[in-house]
Image (cartoon, grey):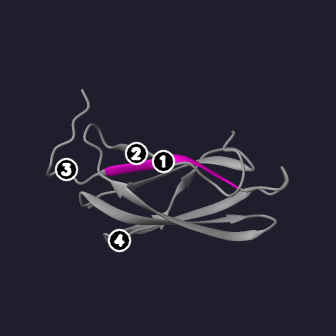
Amino acid sequence: PAHAWPWDSTVKLGGKVGCNYAASNTVQWAWVSGSDGESGWASLGSGGMTRPYSFTFHRAPGSMTVKVNWGCSIDGSHSTSFGLNRPAVGESVTRDICYWSFCRL
């Protein structure tokens, strides 16, 4: 069964990240950083204009700010920030990040 313990600070962030304008404007990379001091390259799944991503925080407080930077092959780098709360059940949090486009894989 899925658990969320007050002392378990692991949060698995995932979802879809996307570019826009043209199918050839593909997601090249994604960098995730949290206000808890953790940061790193997100794992990217297969795809093109939209790709699944995931990043695991190991020291997440109850709530924090997350910044995601990602690069598109045609129009370069993009960035967004959002609040992230540790889930009450389990460890997974889904957040789709698509720059003015539908998040379709």
Q: Is residue 32 magenta?
A: no
**Counting residues from the N terminus, which is met first, the one under dot 4 or under dot 1?**
1
**Counting residues from the N terminus, which is met first, the one under dot 4 or under dot 3?**
3
- CB of mark 3 within 8 Å of CB of mark 1? no
- CB of mark 2 within 8 Å of CB of mark 4? no
**Counting residues from the N terminus, which is met first, the one under dot 2 or under dot 3?**
3
Viewer-side residue, 91 vs 96: 96
**Counting residues from the N terminus, which is met first, the one under dot 3 or under dot 1?**
3
- Calculate the distance from the C-alpha at mark 3 to the C-alpha at mark 1: 18 Å
Secondary structure of residue under mark 3: loop
Q: Is residue 12 magenta?
A: yes
Q: Which residue is mark 4?
A: 35
Q: Which mark is residue 14?
A: 1
Q: Which mark is residue 66?
A: none
Tell me where residue 71 appears, x and y as whole percent.
68, 66
**Counting residues from the N terminus, which is met first, the one under dot 2 or under dot 4?**
4
Q: Quadrant of the C terminus?
A: top right
> Which amino acid does the dot numbered 1 rest on?
Gly
Task: Estimate how packed mark 3 is, as few (under 14), some (14 to 19) or many (20 or more) residues with alpha carbons within 10 Å.
Answer: some
The stretch of residues the image draws in magenta is 11-18
> Which amino acid does the dot numbered 2 rest on?
Val
Looking at the image, residue 102 lies above or below residue 98: above
Tell me where residue 86 appears, x and y as whole percent.
29, 51
- Calculate the distance from the C-alpha at mark 2 to the C-alpha at mark 1: 6 Å
